[in-house]
Image: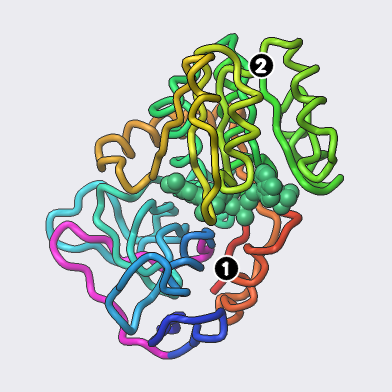
Amino acid sequence: MKAIRFYDYGGPEVLKYEDVPDPKPGPGQVLIRTYAIGVNPFETYIRAGIYGPVPLPNILGVDAAGVVETVGDGVTDFAHGQRVYVIGAPGTYAELILSDQAKIFPLLESLTFAQGAALGVPYGTAHRALFHRGKAQAGETVLIHGASGGVGTAAVQLARAAGLTVFGTAGTDKGLTLVREQGAHQAFNHKDPDYLEKIKAAAEGNGVELILEMLANVNLPKDLDLLAKYGRVVVVGNRGSVEINPRDTMGKDIDIRGMTLMNATTDDLRRMHAEIGEGLKNGALKPIVGQEIPLAEAASAHQEIMQDGAHGKIVLVP
Ligand code: NAP
């Protein structure tokens, strides 16, 4: 099969499209032919060596959708030919992947493979940030600070379906339109010098109860100012350091909550995806795919995902 591997940490150019032996399913495993593969920012951090050592050479990727080829001993829930998506399967930047059956879900006929590849990390992260760490409640106001990308569009849809008032930000007009289309009640441009004042005005002077923060190293001090009394900010994304004045958390009893999807257990993931599955069926959730890029051009997908102007999910197509 063809796969994307890298032998040394570095820029996108270290990603090589090459022949790799086909994997064989062991007990409890399913072999899947990929039709679409999700690209996530943290795969660029692993490639760059920021996330600590991984075995080399390495095939990146955790999200994909495709069709079951064969199953290993003991697999009873999946069969050859079935459309599926996987969450957290190692090494999905490949034509064939192995996954534990617990991390595979049937892919609805109404969804494309590209949409299936947009479900794992983005919807899992958005769900865990909103409900597990953020404790979002119907009737509250949430600000999705960075709402135009893979996680942000999922978070807007999930929050709207759960009965929150949703504010979202984006950095382009196209992104703002996308955020509104996903159900945000109001959208703000995080490049507009006055956008924080506009959010405060929209919150009618009370502040927002919850913020999902996609770029904490830029926005955390601003978030403390935007939050209401007893507000919570969930740090989803961060690319550096920032100085805050801890006193800014005191007067309003503010919680700053870190979160990584990697801390979700397999049971947590299955519960989340049962709920996400219902949202997909009833139409409340609809993954947005902004770009489909050939698997062989994974390096350009890695450049693309680190650019401004997000528009939903970037997927690779074998
Ligand atoms: P993405 O698709 O590339 O989207 C990035 C988002 O950040 C876009 O909405 C972008 O808006 C926005 N952004 C850019 N500049 C911003 C600013 N100054 N203020 C607020 N938002 C800004 O990435 P993603 O997949 O949605 O992931 C978002 C972040 O979460 C990444 O840092 C990723 O590493 C992290 N993440 C964390 C976890 C976890 O488990 N904690 C899981 C998944 C992802 P424009 O492009 O429109 O400016």
Query: Which quadrant of the rendered structure holds the N terminus?
Result: bottom left
Secondary structure found at label 1: strand
Percent x, y of residue 63: 44, 57
- Packing grade of label 2 (10 A; few <14, some 14-19, many >=20) is many
Would you identify the image quadrant in which residue 280 lies?
A: top right
Residue depicted at x 30% and y 73%: 54
- Is residue 116 visible in the rendered image? The answer is no
Disc 2 marks which residue?
207
Question: Is residue 263 found left or right of 232 in the rendered image?
Answer: left
Would you identify the image quadrant in which residue 245 lies?
A: top right
Disc 1 beta carbon < 8 A from ligand 1? no
Residue segment shown in magenta? 19-38
Percent x, y of residue 286: 62, 38
Disc 1 marks which residue?
316
Query: Marks 1 and 2: in contact by CB < 8 Å?
Result: no
Query: Against 149, is 234 above or below?
Result: above
Percent x, y of residue 101: 25, 52
Residue depicted at x 78% and y 17%: 202
Q: Nearer the viewer, residue 294 or 247?
A: 247
- Find the distance from the CA under tag 2 to the CA under tag 1: 39 Å
